[in-house]
Amino acid sequence: MKKISITLIICLVSVLAKAQLGFNYAQYDLGISGTFNRAYTDAETIKSTHSANLHFTYNYTPYLNYIAEVQLGKLAGGDSVNTLSGRQFNNHYVSVTFRAQLQAGEIMDYSNSRFLNALKSLYVSSGVGVIYNNMHDIHRSSLYIDGYTTTGLNTSSELLIPAKIGYEFKLYNSYNEPAIKLDIGYQYNFIMGDQLDGMKVGVRNDGFGQFVIGLKFGVGGITSYRKDIPYMQ
């Protein structure tokens, strides 16, 4: 009798596990990203730089995510020799941001459409953060106009508003859970100030754009979702 009961329990557990196959996901991700940056500031010449990001994600659902991120990198621009203003900067910055990310799969029914299945991991994201600016190399004076100098700070902190659009490619484990995610997107950071380049000119705030490539790894807190998560075959 005991053997029969144990067998029934095992069968029941197996059935329940199979019933959830494709609906489970990790609530927490750890990830790293790299970015290619272009700063839009008071320095006339735009240059490309890079940064590295470390982020932690709380997945409220597979398609609604809350992300805390620390970013370290460089922003640069200007040309002290070949521009009339002489403006040039090299900013070694650190930023901390918090973003909410909404993927299309949260708000649409993709169960019977291959096309919508392909779109369900498209996302938009925004939030708030702080950037800490540190000028390692800066030129504010013109070589060609006597006495022409731009004012500014060598170190500063400013509020930023990140706005991102992208796509999250999900890679599944043997239980059809999204275990690894490849994130490709573009993020523009609106700076609520004018010291990203260490120079204050005019009334327009600074900003910088980033092309982002990252990886996320599920690290636990397995729970279930109301819809099937894997892509339609």
Image (cartoon, rainbow, N blue to C red):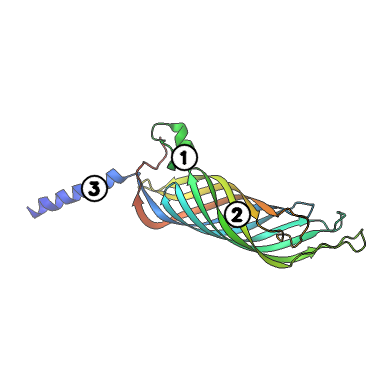
How far apart are the two marked residues, 1 and 2, measured between alpha carbons?
25 Å
- Secondary structure at badge 1 equals loop
Q: Secondary structure at mark 3?
A: helix
Q: Which mark is residue 146?
A: none
- In the image, taking residue 92 as reference, residue 176 lies left or right, namely left
Taking the spot 88% from the left edge, 60% from the top edge, the residue there is: 142
Residue 202 location (% of width, % of height): 78, 55
Q: Is residue 201 left or right of residue 232?
A: right
Are dots 2 and 3 in contact, CB under 8 Å? no
Residue holding disc 2? 161
Disc with the residue nearer the chain's start (1 vs 2): 1
Location of residue 212 in the rendering, given as x and y in whole percent from the top left corner: 59, 50
Q: Residue at x 71, y 62 (%)?
A: 91
Pointer 1 or 3: first along the chain: 3
Residue 29, position as x, y percentages in the image: 45, 56
| In this view, 178 is above or below 89 | above
Q: How many marks?
A: 3
Residue found 50% across the figure and 45% down from its top? 168
CA–CA distance in space, label 2 to label 3: 47 Å
Residue farthest along the left direction in this orientation: 1
Q: Residue at the front extreme?
A: 203
Q: Residues within 10 Å of mark 2 (few under 14, many from 20)?
A: some
Cα–Cα gap, marks 1 and 3: 29 Å
> Between residues 93 and 204, which one lies in front from this camera angle?
204
Question: What amino acid does circle 2 point to?
Answer: Ile
Q: Check disc 2 and report its element: helix, strand or loop.
A: strand
Q: Which residue is mark 1?
A: 120
Direction from residue 100 to residue 156 in the image, left or right: right
Instruction: State the residue at coordinates (10%, 50%).
Output: 4
Residue receiving disc 3: 14
Is 156 rendered above or below residue 9? below
Callout 1 amino acid = Lys
